Amino acid sequence: MLGNTHRSIIRQAVVYAHKLGLKCYLDLIGSQSLTQNALDAADLGVDALQVHYQLSFTSSDSVSEQWEMLRANTTLPIFISTGINRNTITQATNLNPAGLIIGGSITEHTDPKTEVQYFYERIIQK
């Protein structure tokens, strides 16, 4: 669910998901305030957060500074997606997220199997 969705809709979706035994994560893409949405997410019952590496960290603060501000506002696990590639994998893993969602770097590669192996080795070595 998107972080800029109305709070009552997020809460209703979370309640329904939990009734079905499912978990619900909040995608912070397009969020006006990553830190405020992270702070509010636990109150809404959200189970995890997703932040887009390439799209969410856009202010003049460094990615590391923004990540620390985000982490300081929640105890929920945070997953990183979008923009994870060979150039950003080290910085992304150094943030110690709950997990990484690597899509286009693999699916758009001419040899996806080799690319999966590359990321697997980089993450396991961490």
Image: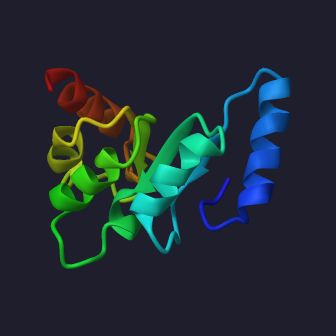
* Image quarter hosting the C terminus: top left
Residue depicted at x 25% and y 61%? 66
Along the line of sight, which residue is nearer the eye, 100 or 72? 72
Residue depicted at x 78% and y 57%? 8
55, above or below 51, in the image: below
Q: Seen from this angle, which residue lies furthest front?
A: 43
Residue depicted at x 37% and y 49%? 73
124, above or below 108, in the image: above
User: Residue 104: x percent and y percent?
Assistant: 45, 54
User: Residue 101: x percent and y percent?
Assistant: 44, 42
The reply to whether residue 101 is visible in this rendering is no
100, above or below 28, in the image: above
Quadrant of residue 43 within the rendered picture? top right
13 vs 78, left or right, is right
The reply to whether residue 14 is visible in this rendering is yes
Quadrant of residue 35 within the rendered picture? bottom left
Colour scheme shown: rainbow
Along the line of sight, which residue is nearer the eye, 103 or 3? 3
